[in-house]
Image (tube, rainbow, N blue to C red):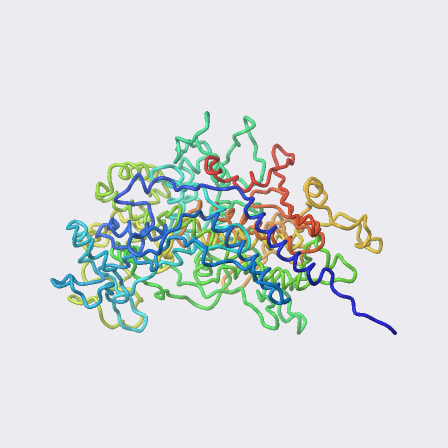
Amino acid sequence: MNYQKPIPQPDGEGRDTQAPARRGAALALAQSLPKLKPASNGEAEDYAGIWPTNFSKGLPHDEFGIVEPIAFRIFAEALAGQSPHDHVPMAAMSHDAMEGMIRGMAVEMAQSALQSLRGGSAAGAPNWQTVPTKTRPLDFNVPLGPAAYQPQPNYSEPQNPADVAGPKGHYWPKSYVEALQASASSFAFVADYRCRFRKSLDGNFAEPAARGWESPRAGHTYVLRGPDPSDTAMAPAPRLGKSELCAELAEVYAMALLRDVPFDGSNSIGEGDGVSPNGVRVQNIVDALGKLSWFNAMGAPVSSFPERLEQGWTLTPEEMRRRYARFFDAGAVPPSNDGQRPVLAPILPSTAFRGSTPGSKAGPYISQFLLQGNASRVGEGRYKPKHGFIEYGAQRVCQKVDSHERGRDHMTHWDCWLDVQNGANFKGADLFGGEPRFITTPRDLVTFVHFDQLYQAYLNAGLLLLALDYPLGTGFPSGKNHPTRGSFATFGPGDVLSLVAGVASEALRAVRRQKFQVHLRARPEAIAGLLTLHGNGESPRLGQTAQAGLEAMLKELKKTNAGGLSLLDLIAEHNSTQNQSLKRSPAGSNDGTAAAGELKIRLPAHDSPFASKLDDASGNPGKNYLLPMAYPEGSPMHASYGAGHATVAGACVTVLKAFFEMFHDPRPDGPERNPLDPSYWPFPSGEKLAQDDRFWTPRTLWDAGMKEVLIGNGDTLQEVDKPEWNADKLTVQGELNKLASNISIGRNWAGVHYYSDYYDSLRLGERVAVGILREQLLTYPEPVTMHFNGYDGERIVLSSTGDPAARDATVTIYEKKNASWSSCDFAKWWVKNLPPEWVS
């Protein structure tokens, strides 16, 4: 029998042509994205010299928490890549041009490698000698921590001429010290400050080490798939003194007071009958928030950007979207009295503190993907979904968490707050309480998002769906829709799980650029410090404009009456109680040995002058408006806007929705179904799919095999008893959206982010994922379709014919307006949440 093994087609030179061509097509897609010119909210310029609303954590600050100006300038220049201290030669080149060049080199290198392997010439290899170098510091030479040296007469001739390293890794560059010495006012500003609080991890109290900034130049890196970090952006953040920031700060104050109240069930946040440690009911706290103009259905909030308002409107489009999302799921069509402005209803405990995406306000607060497990594959009935174990190969992942100690908050004392702003590292001083438990309270959730690997929750969700044998996309050319082709390396577990992890890296690079290179927004803990200064008569140090903004915020926050006290009064009372539980260092020494059962953080022997003003000698609460933090170290060492957790959530959940089937297939099922019939395959794509309502009927939890809806109750899960929360009412897509909201807003519950950080970052992550998926479609040599609802409820269809000549990958967007669906240009959708003037 004559037989010749078939050769793969295309192969040889054909494949050599196809592979780089598809890489080139991916580059063309990336370069076709709208070009953006993002900007911050203008506060860095308005408050120049003081910078109270910009991120400065880790830099030297004075006793009132005001950043030393020389240090801030060095920091900002190093972030931008413009440091005058350490440079390589500069070649002017835009980030977009550099991205195109680097991707082009990747294509050329692939072609060169193939030619070399086949014995051809490598003449096509890139000439690295002609590559222009982008300006960047050789070192991130920025002063870190307080008083990194002791002033001494002979400092002009130090042993180490490059820099001065102080105790526990505090670091001041020599150039900075020289600049301080040349400026008497700046030198006096910070030179003598040392950490006052002490930390114990080994039983002995000592001055804490300094924390370095986390990947401050990641936004300058380039990517070889998906949108470049410069091709995504976030709208300008809310400004000091305006309604949105006032509401956001009030919200995180309220969340701090409710960390130990269960989310759902009896005596809970959702029912409104839970009680804070101050003895105030949740309903009263939510009602207090409702008195703010931003949350009040009849309120008239003041815009952060009056110069951008269209005639007849009081908020910008970006502000309106964020505000309306507090009352309705994004994509919902709310009732309207004039065809434009929706009629708002009061916020309720059942919908307060929730997400903005479809499904986030339905059912229990916590997504089923953070609670449930799957039935065990061995020992029938040994493990059930309510036991919370997820199959991880032959191992099991338990959904329980080791939760932080109930009732313990941090950074409620001014001296500790100031140490942290100066870079003191109190990480590791956490206290934990009891046995592992399911996520029941906000404190359980903030513990999860304190220690999680950023894609962990979405990897778990993917594993759970696979263990449930939940179907992958119907638009894939293999799997359950095909009689002979299964899915693994493509369109299966190997594809989706690796991509869930992979998009996290690109999402982090994109959001780091927003954090450090664009917005540099201060964390909530810093703005609470400004309010504390203002409440105690020290805000003139911040300048008249900042003082006026703080006064406006203070007046509005005083309206938040909850049980006879404003939220600020409740915070001051809570902080006083927390501070009384701390032990002081012995007189004459801040160090020493920890006593049995003592906390890991210790007060100084004597309070600083300003700290002594906040609580009187009897411990009665004064005007201490510091934000009680869930973590000893407070927020991370990077700026607030955008949020890393939220951006990764937006990207990873988008991948899950694209790969797993979110909707019922309306085509015939059973013996008459023939996936190989040309009338049946390929799956509908593009506008045909986006317009056809039959393909958009959502699958429910019941369809996924999750027959019970559960809530956390300490170390057990209990079934809920609400018909509207039944498994046949909640959708898989809605619970995935809720998962993204839980992880993102969990950081708000911790006090490290605002709502706007979550809202805009989630949508940033979505665009990163869509950009990556669009390019990935080019790798498949056959028709592929993915479809899902976006975070604003829109219908998103990604499709490719697989035609090597066309090398097409399209994204079709349909939005719902006035109860009907209409097409939205992809480029317009990409910049939907941005000011129009940013788009070139």
Residue 536 screen position, x and y as percent: 23, 44
- For this view, does 592 lie left or right of residue 250? left
- Expressed as whole percent of the image width and height from the top left, the position of residue 654 reads 58, 52
Q: Quadrant of residue 225?
A: bottom right
> In the rendered picture of this protein, how many numbered marks are placed on residues?
0
Q: Residue 656 or 629: which is nearer the viewer?
A: 656
Residue placed furthest toward the right: 1
The answer to whether one can see residue 689 in this image is yes
Is the N terminus in the top left, top right, bottom left or bottom right quadrant? bottom right
The part of the image, by quadrant, that contains residue 373 is: bottom right
The spot of residue 744 in percent (x, y) is: 48, 52
| Residue 594 sits above or below residue 520 on the image | below
Residue lying furthest left:
153
Left/right placement of residue 780 relative to residue 62 reads: right
**Of residues 194 and 13, the one drawn nearer to the viewer in this rendering:** 13
Does residue 262 appear in this view?
Answer: no
109 displayed left or right of 605:
right
Position of residue 774 measured from the top left corner of the image (x, y, whole percent): 61, 50
Viewer-proximal residue, 558 or 342? 342
Q: Nearer the viewer, residue 155 or 352?
A: 155
In the figure, residue 705 lies in which quadrant?
bottom right
Q: Is residue 528 above or below residue 303?
A: below
